[in-house]
Image: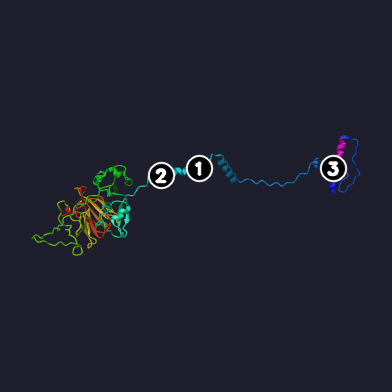
Amino acid sequence: MLGIIALSVLAATFGGARLTNHHSHAFAAPVTGLTLPAVGSTVAQADVSVVRPPAINKTLRAVQPVPQKQQQVAQQLATLAASPTPAPPAAQEDAVVRAAAVAPPPDLPPYQVYQVQDGDTVSSIAARFGIDPQYIIANNAEIQDSDFLQLGQSIIIPAGNGILHEVRYGETLSDIAARYDVSVDAITSFAANHITTPDDITETQLVFVPGGTPPAPPPAPEASPAPEPSDGSGDAVATPVPGGGDDGGGAAAPPASGPASSHGLIWPFVGPISSYYGPSHPLGIDIDGYNAPGAPIVAATSGTVVFAGGNACCSYGLYVVVMSPDGIETLYGHLSSIEVSQGQTVSQGEVLGIIGSTGYSTGRHLHFEVIDNGVRVNPLNYLP
């Protein structure tokens, strides 16, 4: 009903407006006396907004502010989108692979330590590591029988056919090369030696000599009884020998307090010789000390201690090297303890250490070597 009345008022308003514009004289006075429910008798001035089409009521979503973090991410994404596409990472990986392919291989260690297994022989071990059996024997002084090894024994396996040489006092690289009949370049070219120039070696440095010729085994010494001291009447007097008798075996060595030989050496220890210098034991002699625990080892010559140390697990174990003023070098191996230090001057007969069984050893004994001005000799020829 109200809608009909509203439309009627609108119609009357538009009609009156047009009549007023064109026929203003027709309606000179306002209409009065018309009474309708809820409508005043006076017609109000027409509102222009009434003639506009009704507005459609729409609910707009409130615009939420963009967090600063999202703005930063959006900016970064926009920057990445605008930047050139980088090269695929595969190209970088290929470069790394190529660099690794041309890089030099790591240094080959000069040797490794092998534990003897059941059934091993020198020949079988050499075949396993691809080297000649003679180089296993040459690098392991304690191997006396190539077909007999102790189970669990530690032996040195060289990196190839060659000799491991410990630089001694006064040696040069030329001396070492000449000793093993190789060129100096053969030694310096082995990367693990880390030798840049021929003079770049130090005392006690371990050098691998590729293709070195093992020293020729000396001829076996002729069997001869040890000299016996005399009491002045021409009758021989038995010399008490620690470790001698039925259990000791071997020839008895004269006492250390005896006279010096023509070369000036005295015996470093009193005891039976358990290993002679020869093809099966080419470096020196062994003097048995099974029955002489704690026995002192004395200097066979006076001179300077050029080495005192070693490794109790390997090779000579703990050992001492003395260089005499005449150039005679003596080595005392497998000591249980050392009583001198490197650089110390010692007198003939002075205690160097205590007998033991360190390193590659089958029992308590002294390993004794003599090198006369760079030439290895039979110690028995230099002892009284």
Precedes in sequence: disc 3 or disc 2: 3
On residue 88, the disc is 1
| Numbered badge on residue 101 | 2
Look at the numbered discs 3 and 1 and tell me whether their residues touch, using CB distance below 8 Å: no
Q: Quadrant of the C terminus?
A: bottom left
Could you say where residue 353 lies in the image, as x and y percent from the top left? 24, 56
Specify whether residue 313 is in view: no
Which picture quadrant has residue 281? Answer: bottom left
Q: Residues within 10 Å of mark 2 (few under 14, many from 20)?
A: few
Give me the C-alpha separation between circle 3 and circle 1: 76 Å
Percent coordinates x, y for residue 217 in the rendering: 21, 52
Please, what is the three-letter code of the amino acid marked with disc 2? Answer: Ala
The Cα atoms of the two marked residues, 3 and 2, are separated by 96 Å
Q: Secondary structure at mark 1?
A: loop
Q: CA distance from mark 1 to mark 2?
A: 21 Å
- Magenta extent: 9-21
Q: Identity of the amino acid at label 3?
A: Leu
